[in-house]
Image (spheres, rainbow, N blue to C red):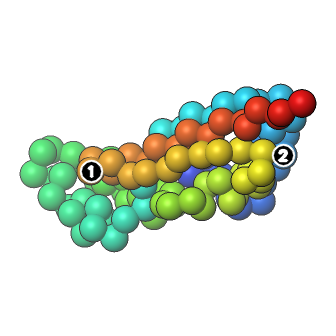
């Protein structure tokens, strides 16, 4: 739950730096969704305060969806295979594995 706080340029730099050694990425981020933004005010019924609601709104708006995190990190589909999906509770799950090279 940290990558959504970086801009596109920073994510590209992170991707470049980490790919040299990484074999596996596992991220649990915020999913970007209009529905979740629409439903967010209902969390006030659960007792959330203004600060929590503001932070949640900012996180949802800057979250991820679909394949965009792979693109932002600059993952080459010839070198990496990945899965990305959003959960019903608003999480964006991303797992990428480096493809093994055949010799």
In what quadrant of the picture does the C terminus appear?
A: top right
Taking depth in this image into account, of 99 and 21 the one nearest to the observer is 99
What residue lies at 24% left-to-right and 60% top-to-bottom?
Answer: 40
> Vertical placement of 29 versus 23: above or below?
below
- The mark found on residue 16 in the picture is 2
Q: Residue furthest left?
A: 45
Q: Is residue 67 visible?
A: yes
Q: Is residue 58 left or right of residue 6?
A: left
What residue lies at 26% left-to-right and 50% top-to-bottom?
Answer: 88
Q: Earlier in the sequence, mark 1 or mark 2?
A: 2
Q: Is residue 88 left or right of residue 73?
A: left
Image coords of residue 37 (percent x, y): 31, 65
Res 24 quadrant in image: top right
Image coords of residue 11 (percent x, y): 72, 52
Q: Secondary structure at mark 2?
A: helix
Taking depth in this image into account, of 46 and 74 the one nearest to the observer is 74
Real-space Cα separation, disc 1 to disc 2, in angstroms: 31 Å
Q: Which residue is mark 1?
A: 88
Res 100 quadrant in image: top right
Q: Secondary structure at mark 1?
A: loop
Res 57 quadrant in image: bottom left
Image coords of residue 87 (percent x, y): 33, 48
What residue lies at 34% left-to-right and 70% top-to-bottom?
Answer: 34
What residue lies at 12% left-to-right and 45% top-to-bottom?
Answer: 46
């Amino acid at each position: 739950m940290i990558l959504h706080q970086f801009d596109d340029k920073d994510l590209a730099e992170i991707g470049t730096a980490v790919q040299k050694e990484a074999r596996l990425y596992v991220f649990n981020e915020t999913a970007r969704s209009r529905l979740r933004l629409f439903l967010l005010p209902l969390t006030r019924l659960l007792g959330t305060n203004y600060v929590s609601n503001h932070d949640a709104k900012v996180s949802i708006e800057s979250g991820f969806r679909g394949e965009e995190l792979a693109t932002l990190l600059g993952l080459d589909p010839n070198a990496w295979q990945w899965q990305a999906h959003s959960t019903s509770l608003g999480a964006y799950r991303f797992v990428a594995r480096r493809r093994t090279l055949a010799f």
